[in-house]
Image: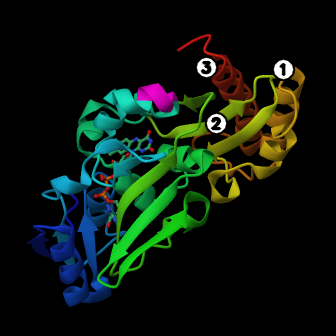
């Protein structure tokens, strides 16, 4: 049986308390949210924090609400809450699409939005969603609050801009009128990590011109989980299936997948294009109010 190296355990009572504990214990301390990524890594001795700061009592980081022109989501919001949220279903069904295919109910009941994006696994589904949606990540330390765009949040595999004395507290997504969004994933078996996945949002004016678009990709080596060239090919142009097919080809070209146990690189690149196409088509139907 694999066991982690010895560590101290602290249970934070508030965000301020968690930040004070991080400062007191220094860079060898780590927060633990759902624990579904960190604890397996500790058992495999791929992570060895000397102190674990448990943030599961921070109920004030567990919410999904409309806040001005944004939807604000607390970092401790569980996958299951993202899946069942009526606010997200109304404005961004991309979350429901993605959450349906993330892991299984046991993981979804415990794993958190914050833990998922902070883990920064290159196959993480919610990182592609936040990148597609142009989300803003709200990070706190004892010094104050700073915000970072989702596309600047991940600095590499398993690396983010969150410093050792900081906590991601909130993810904000702007509410967009006449918006459709969707997520498509291929996995080897139900609940598995993606072989490839992609999601998008699309807004249209009354004449059918794309006023804004975001495309996110995961598991295919797309820098910052996004496909800006594909977005540029659509933005400001009339929407058509030909335009979608051309944009999807640009999305595939922007990938740099690795051949591994989930499949060969060229298959994943092909999937990136195909899944982008399917997501754009479904987002278009939703933007036109023609389907759920
Ligand atoms: C069997 C299984 C299948 C899975 N399948 C998928 C899948 O298909 N798709 C997918 O995307 N994911 C999948 N996951 C991962 C799952 O989504 C995890 O819940 C998620 O990756 C981590 O969330 P967590 O809350 O458990 O984070 P934790 O394991 O608690 O933490 C992960 C990392 O983030 C840091 N952290 C956590 N919260 C914060 C915060 N608020 N601020 C700063 N740092 C923080 C921790 O210090 C740690 O380094 C799977 C996991 C398992 C176990």
Kindly check if marks 3 and 1 are in contact, taking CB atoms under 8 A apart as contact. Answer: no
Q: Residue 1: where, in percent of width, then height? A: 19, 56
Q: Residue at x 27, y 31 (%)?
A: 105
Q: Is residue 44 magenta?
A: no
Q: Which residues are magenta?
A: 89-93
Q: Earlier in the sequence, mark 2 or mark 1?
A: 2
Mark 2, mark 3: which one is toward the viewer? 3
Q: CA distance from mark 2 to mark 3?
A: 12 Å
Instruction: Please name the residue that numbered disc 1 is placed on.
Output: 241
Does 120 sit left or right of 64 as displayed? right
Residue tagged 3: 286
Could you tell me which secondary element the residue under label 2 belongs to? strand
- Residue at position x 19%, y 75% in the image: 16
- Image spot of residue 35 (x, y percent): 25, 55
Q: In this picture, is 124 found above or below 52? A: above
The Cα atoms of the two marked residues, 3 and 1, are separated by: 15 Å
Camera-nearest residue between 211 and 52: 211
Residue occupied by mark 2? 200
Q: Residues within 10 Å of mark 1 (few under 14, many from 20)?
A: few
- Which residue is depicted at the point 42% across and 61% down? 118
Residue 184 vertical position relative to residue 23 in the rendered view, above or below:
above
Tell me which corner region of the image, top left, top right, bottom left or bottom right, holds residue 103: top left
Judge by depth and name the residue closer to the eye, 124 or 91. Answer: 91
Mostly what secondary structure, the magenta segment? helix
Which secondary structure lies at badge 1? helix
Residue 3 picture quarter: bottom left
* Lower position in the chain sequence, tag 2 or tag 3: 2
Q: Going from the N terminus, do you reach mark 3 or mark 1 first? A: 1
Q: How many marks?
A: 3
């Amino acid at each position: 049986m694999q066991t982690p190296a010895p560590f101290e355990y602290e249970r934070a009572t508030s965000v301020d308390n968690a930040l004070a504990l991080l400062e007191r214990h220094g860079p060898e301390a780590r927060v633990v949210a759902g624990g579904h990524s960190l604890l397996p890594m500790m058992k495999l001795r791929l992570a060895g924090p000397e102190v674990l700061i448990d943030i599961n009592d921070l109920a004030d980081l567990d919410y999904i609400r409309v806040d001005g022109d944004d939807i604000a989501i607390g970092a401790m919001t569980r996958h299951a809450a993202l899946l069942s949220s009526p606010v997200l279903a109304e404005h961004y069904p991309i979350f429901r699409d993605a959450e349906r295919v993330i892991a299984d109910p046991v993981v979804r009941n415990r794993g958190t939005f914050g833990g998922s994006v902070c883990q920064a696994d290159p196959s993480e589904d919610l990182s592609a969603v936040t990148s597609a949606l142009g989300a803003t990540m709200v990070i706190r330390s004892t010094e104050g609050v700073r915000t970072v765009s989702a596309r600047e949040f991940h600095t590499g595999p398993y690396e983010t801009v969150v410093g050792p004395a900081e906590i991601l507290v909130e993810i904000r997504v702007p509410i967009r009128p006449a918006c459709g969004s969707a997520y498509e994933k291929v996995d080897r078996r139900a609940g598995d990590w993606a072989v490839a996945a992609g999601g998008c949002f699309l807004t249209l004016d009354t004449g059918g011109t794309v006023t804004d678009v975001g495309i996110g990709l995961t598991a295919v080596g797309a820098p910052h989980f996004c496909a800006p060239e594909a977005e540029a090919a659509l933005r400001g142009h009339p929407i058509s299936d030909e335009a979608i097919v051309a944009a999807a080809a640009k999305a595939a070209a922007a990938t740099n997948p690795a051949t591994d146990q989930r499949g060969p690189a060229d298959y994943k690149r092909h999937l990136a294009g195909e899944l982008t196409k399917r997501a754009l088509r479904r987002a278009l139907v939703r933007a036109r109010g023609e389907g759920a």
